Structure formats: C-alpha cells, structure tokens
Image (cartoon, rainbow, N blue to C red):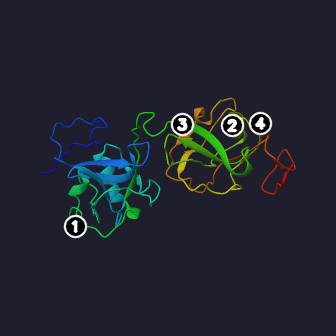
Amino acid sequence: MLITEILQDVGSVPALSTPMIPPTPGLSLRLAGTYNYCEGRVEVYYEGAWGTVCGNNWDMKDAQVVCQQLGCGDAVATLPWPKFGSGSGEIILSDVQCNGDEFFLWSCKNPGWGVHNCNHQQDATVLCTGEKYKPAGTEGDVIFVELVGGPDRCAGRIQVIYFANWRTVVCGEDWDMRDAEVVCNQIHCGYALAALSDGSFGKGETGPLMTKVNCSGSEYDLMTCPYEYRPATCGNYKDAAVICSDSELKPTGMPGFGSSTIWFRR
C-alpha cells in the first residue's frame, strides 16, 4: 500500500506537510550538500544510516518523484557530480526507474537495496523548484561578493558566496553600469568603469545564483537589488563582470566602449 506522507531529514527538519498517514518505518529521504533542502545530492536513510543513490540511468522522472516526496515542487534538472560533492557510506539504490507519479523513490523499479555497480562519483542529484533553507549558521551564512579572473581584486568576473551554496555565478542578462556601480562600491573599489557580459574574464565552474539584476545604482549590496533568483542555467548569456576605477586595468575609448575596446594596464 502506497503511503503519501512526505518524509524529512531525521531530527533536523520539521515536517512541512500534514497528511495523517503513518510514515514508512525506518526509511527517509533528503537532499544533501547544499544550503537548500530542495536541491542537492540524493540520500536515503536505510537500516539506521544515510547512504546515496547511484545516478546510473537517473533521469527527470526519478528527480520528479524526489521533489514531490520532499514537498519541493517540480524537478528542474539533474546535475553531474561533483556539483554537491561525493556522498559517503553505502550506496542504497541504483538504476532507479520511476514513472514519475510514485509517492516514494523506493517504490520505483530498482534491482534491490544495496545492489549496485557504482562509486560515489556517480551519486544522483536533483534541483527542485521549491526552496527550504537551512537555518543561518548551519553551513556558514557568510555572504560576500568578489571579482575573480582579472588582474586584481577590482576587475573580473563576479562571484557571490552565499551561505554554503554551490551557485556563485551572476548571469550577464540585463547586466549594466548601474549593477556594476553597486558591485564596485560594495567591494570598495571606487566607481564602475565597465559592466561586461561578453565572457572577458572567463566562465565560472559553478551554477548561476542570480540573473536579470536590476539595480538603481544606489544600493549598498548587490543582493538587495531586484533580480531573478536561482535560474536553471544562464542560457545564451555569459557571466557578468566588472571593471572598477581602482583596478590597474583601464579601457581606451571611454565612454561608449564596445566589443572592440582595447584594455591596458595603467
């Protein structure tokens, strides 16, 4: 008989749904390796310990069952290792084949508990539409902005460290000088000389945290500006970047520089 209660991480997350049906004894499900309970590495609590799920044949139907079971909305994507790091312990399930409408991941077709031919570099992952944050401080609630990939700390690709989130990228969609001005002020690098979205300082290796940033230019912190949070990808847009006045890198032809701008060090 199928049971519809959503199971939460044992002892750490309060139940966010209220079906009056007993849980599956001894089994639970969680997403681990990030600050958000609705994205991460798929882990199952089985026989008194947490273990992982092998990503062999893992697809969006399997991910949908996980998201629905956790009350996290719909599945957005599955991601390859090592976005959320490698798990530890036993590999509990493998070759899961869901139809997408099961109430529990372990109700989906699979070869049996502990049957696998995998290692932890193949751990399954899920991104869901929902968001359930871990309490501040549980994985480091430090928030800061830095510029990377440039010649100094005042020029480069924007990287946002937000909680222990694996996402750090700001997408270049709608990125402009007002947004760049906020960044330069925030990191104490003077004023903005350039707002770039052409990949001049390379591509970040993590996922996108924000896109369509729309600052007025007077904000004290980039994350106080309006923006679209946690897009699935940056699409055709490249990482946002900034050159501030305190950088040794300067554009010629100011203002009105474009793709043919020549950059030089002062």
> Which percent across, then down, holds residue 215?
65, 35
Count numbered badges in the picture. Answer: 4
Say whether residue 166 is left or right of residue 119: right
Work out whether mark 4 precedes mark 1 in sequence or the reverse, and give the earlier one: 1
- Amino acid type, mark 1: Pro
Residue in view at x 32 percent, y 52 percent: 43
Q: Which residue is mark 2?
A: 187
* Real-space CA distance between mark 4 and mark 1, rounded to the nearest whole angstrom: 60 Å
* Helix, strand or loop status at disc 1: loop
Q: Which residue is mark 1?
A: 111
Q: Quadrant of residue 60?
A: bottom left
Say whether residue 188 is left or right of residue 224: right
Question: Within 10 Å of the Cα at label 3, are there few (<14), some (14-19), or many (20+) other Cα atoms?
Answer: few
Marks 4 & 2, CB-CB < 8 Å contact? no
Q: Quadrant of residue 194?
A: top right
Residue in view at x 30 percent, y 45 percent: 70
- Amino acid type, mark 2: Ile
Q: Which residue is mark 4?
A: 191
**Which residue occupies the foreground of this view, 24 or 120?**
120
Question: Within 10 Å of the Cα at label 4, are there few (<14), some (14-19), or many (20+) other Cα atoms?
Answer: some
Question: Within 10 Å of the Cα at label 1, are there few (<14), some (14-19), or many (20+) other Cα atoms?
Answer: few
**Mark seen at residue 142:** 3
* Real-space CA distance between mark 3 and mark 2, rounded to the nearest whole angstrom: 15 Å
- Amino acid type, mark 4: Tyr
Residue in view at x 75 percent, y 38 percent: 189
